[in-house]
Image (cartoon, rainbow, N blue to C red):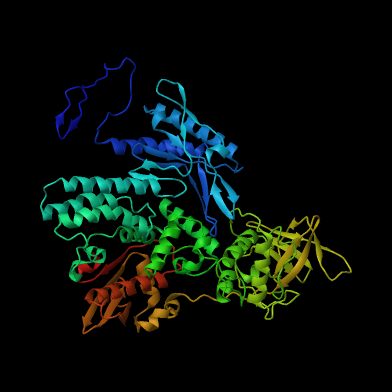
Amino acid sequence: MNHHIRTIYGDSSQSANRHTWEAPIAGIGQGNGAGPAIWAVVSSPMFEIMQQEGFYALIQGAISLQQRSITGFAFVDDTDLCVTHPSNTAEKVTQHMQQAVTNWEGLLRATGGALVPEKCFWYLIAFEYKNQKWHYLKQQRLPGTLSVLDTDRHRIQIQRLDPSEARRTLGVQLAPDGNMLIELAYLVDVAKDWQRKMKNSHLGRLDGMFSLRNVLLRKMVYPLPATTFNPDQCRTIMSPILAQGLPSAGFIRTFPQALAHGPLKFCGINIPNLFTEQTLAHIQILLKFSNQPLDLTGFLLRASGELMRLELGLTGQLFEAPLLLQDEITDSWMKSTWIATREADIHLMIDIPDFPLQRQGDQELVRLFLQHGFRQPHLGALHRCRMFLQVLRVSDICTGNGDQLITSNWKNCPPQTSEYSWPKSAKPSATDWNTWERALSRSLNTGRQNRLPIPLGPYRYHKPQGWYYSPEDTALWFASSSNWHCHGNIPSRSRTQTFHKHGETATPPQTLRRATVRTNPTTFTLTGSGCIAKQATKATGLKALQQLGFVNEWNWCLTIVGNINDLLVDIREGYGYAVSDGSYQEGRGAAAWIIEGKTNSNRLIGQCISPSDEDGHSSFRSELAGIHAILLTIKTIMLSDSKKTIFRIACDRKSVLQ
């Protein structure tokens, strides 16, 4: 059998067969339409083997502590491998990566493939702290080499790049440090090349606009989900495009850019704004993946968001944080999107794990500093101290009694062991510590004894973790992820209670108090303890539905017909049905719905208004309000049921769902 290549220009005159090469070859041939699918089948076991051999990068969420091991990413023949090492040293990581490359090359050769050393490159990521910032280390400061066997079994050294050097990956020039300079230069060159060709062309106005919209701008929009251009960089890219595109389409060169990017109904030309398109692309990705921790993209987004939350030090919606804090946040894709949405007054609600306030009267330290007027550069000093101490809340730096700050030795180590995974932080300067102490004194109104004027209240109930004190047996207890350890009291005439460092596994008593402990060379010292509030009973079913805030705002009215428990049984067995309808007239909307099981003898009948302003209201919104009400009702009343089931919803306007 002879193998030819077929293109738009016809079949190749030359061909290849099994007699072309002296040594037998493997593979499916260039241009095979089944290539991507076959490569997916071949590469999947290869990645599984790499995972089993321990060649992967371990990524952990800073707050959720969820972990994901990632061997690499592959799209057709474009493959990226990544590894970390428990030692976290450059030498060990390099050795581990060499083993991974050797293993991958062997697996690839066993399947009939081979690595081309000239097309391979690698990065070694490490940091140094300089001038109050973390910086990527370059090759001169961090030696290391990798090599691979070529097709002739000769060992060739792979090109190593600095983290600031970008390479084209799936059509986008990306660098590990996140800079967009190479991609910016590439897109500017593409824009200028199009400008030059359009000047020498004889296209009509319609053809010129078609070339701008459907040829050039599609190439410009393609990389935007991965880029983090700022508005000035986007204007630099668009400048030569508009300079030639507007005259070619019949507009003067000085045509206002606001109108050029404006919609047609406002007399604009509707030319996409690159920065707006980039922001929208990022928002779509976040809305699609941020609530999916099991998806790889979703996990990475959430991990980045969790670390960003620790740096911000604020609870609530992540992207609602004030931009006053942006200078202290590590540059990332998430930070770029946060800044873009805040500046555009876009309120983006995404599901990123949060940290709770531990006690009644507790507050985030960052929010406290902002409320008392601290701004840059003081916020920078406070951020460095807070990250070094690994604290988020007032309760993190208070004794268990909740009435005094823990200040002993905090310039050398955190006051308490944190339940979160914090990034490495350098020790703050003496000036930073002075700013920290002044900010706490001013914000908390503490005196010379560092006592709070209003003590913190009881601890909120949460999953047992950390230190506890038992007044019954005057023992100190520590709750790990799997066991409880009891540390016996050391008798002493002092009012300060000390405990043995060695603990024994045991069952704790019922009456425990949360405790703060100071670690000594051979003992533990109890610095304070506080009571734990009783766990509130969580409402379920229809009661939980009634407690939702917007139920009252939407004037929900829910009527039960028959037996609600029989209806729930039908829904669990897959016999759930619902129908909704909406109405709209003179700027007002309403919706009604029915949920029932096998028969109409057991059902829920509901109705509500669909609030909105006049500009955003329509009959579609009313239809969606009914569907939303059905889904929310089912989710709430079936919250405790983990079994998946089928539920059917009907509405009379298919276009609503489209």
Q: Residue furthest top?
A: 22
Q: Is residue 484 above or below residue 588?
A: above
Q: Is residue 524 visible?
A: yes
Q: Is residue 419 above or below residue 111?
A: below
Is 319 positioned to the left or the right of 89 in the image?
left
Q: Is residue 192 above or below residue 336?
A: above
User: Which residue is at 55% across, 37% downward?
Assistant: 140
**How far across and down, in percent of the image, does residue 173 sit?**
37, 44
Q: Quadrant of the N terminus?
A: top left
**How far across and down, in percent of the image, does residue 42 sit?**
36, 35
Q: Front-most of 60 and 304?
A: 304
Q: Residue furthest right?
A: 493
User: Which residue is at 44% across, 69% downward?
Assistant: 639
Q: Front-most of 131 and 628?
A: 131
Q: Front-most of 291 and 98?
A: 98
Residue 493, picture quadrant:
bottom right
